[in-house]
Image: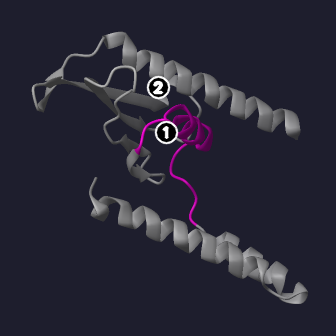
Amino acid sequence: MSNMIKKPAKIAFIAIVSAAMLAGGCSTGKKKAATTKATRAAPTMGVNSYLWRASLETLNFMPLDQVDPFGGVIVTDWYASPEAPNERFKANVYILDTNLRADALKTAIFKQVRSGSSWVDATTDADTGRQIENAILTRARELYIATVDAQ
């Protein structure tokens, strides 16, 4: 994994945590103004938040290589299951819209198998990507329903 790819994500995480700590540490009289100002200044996600959270939860067993919540891209690093150490998988998830719709999600799954001391690209079952998409969509619907029911 490249540290250069991880660096923007770390910087964004640090900035968000710092902003939250600053907003929480304001005096009572200034807290509302600081929070309102921070809320206005904070960028919103460019994609559907339910699809985004569901994608991260569904792929939480795989190491993340690149995440962009504004562009809607999640790229995992290679993952090899302990049960099958001679094959590994990588996933790319693209969230294409701000609406919770099936056509707002696209996945690409890549597979490699060990050949001697190197890895060789292999074909994946076409249904694998659809199964991942269905799992993400199902979880996104669950998150949406839980939010609506809570209101």
Q: Nearer the viewer, residue 94 or 65?
A: 65
Provide the secondary structure element on which disc 2 rests: helix
Q: Residue 122: x, y in percent? A: 18, 19
Label 2 belongs to which residue? 103
Residue 48 bears which disc, if any?
Answer: none
Q: Residue 82: x, y in percent? A: 39, 26
Q: Is residue 49 above or below residue 106?
A: below
Amino acid at dot 1: Asp
Residue 81 sits in which quadrant?
Answer: top left
Q: Is residue 120 above or below residue 56?
A: above
| Magenta extent | 43-63
Do labels 2 and 1 touch, CB within 8 Å? yes
Answer yes or no: is residue 41 visible: no
Provide the secondary structure element on which disc 1 rests: loop
Q: Is residue 73 left or right of residue 16?
A: left
Label 1 belongs to which residue? 97
Which residue is at 47% across, 23% downward? 133
